[in-house]
Image (cartoon, helix red, strand yellow):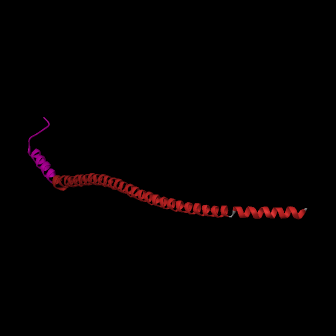
Amino acid sequence: MFLKLDGTLWIQIINFFIFYAILNFVYIKPASAALRKRRAYLDSLHSEYEAALRDVEELKNEADNKRAEGRREGDHVAATIRNEAMKQAEEIVAKAQTEFSRIVEEAETKIHREMSIARASEDRLVAELAGEMVERAVGRL
């Protein structure tokens, strides 16, 4: 038999438990504590990263909403300005048409007046022209 149950076995067993206690106190507990702290730190980083991703997504959505709202507001302002410009253009066209009609009426009135004057003096002018033509014709003979 290779194993003897003498005093050295009990000393080896006691020596093993002492060595295990020292090893546990010096290495295993500090290493496991460091690993727990590292795991907790990594877990906190992971949760912060997830929270940051959610914040980024929320901020992107908020920016998209604000951009869309700004675009809608800009379109509304542009439509309002366009409508106002159309109203002003219509007013300008109406004023121009009124002014054009007034000028045309004044021109027609002036033309009718001058035509009346010309027709009134037409007989006198024809007589003068006829007399002038006779004088030239007789003067050449």
Does the magenta portion include 84? Answer: no
Q: Looking at the picture, how far across and down is residue 24, in whole percent?
A: 16, 52
> Is residue 33 or residue 87 the one in the foreground?
87
Work out which quarter of the rendered image holds the N terminus and state it: top left
> Is residue 112 or residue 107 the one in the foreground?
112
The residue furthest right is: 141
* Quarter of the figure with residue 119: bottom right
* Quarter of the figure with residue 116: bottom right
What residue span does the magenta drawing correspond to?
Answer: 1-21
Q: Looking at the picture, how far across and down is residue 97, in whole percent?
A: 51, 59
Residue under the point 76% across and 65% down: 128
> Is residue 4 or residue 114 the one in the foreground?
114
Residue 127 appears left or right of 67: right
Residue 5 higher or lower than 134, as above or below: above
Residue under the point 79% across and 64% down: 131
Does the magenta portion include 10? Answer: yes
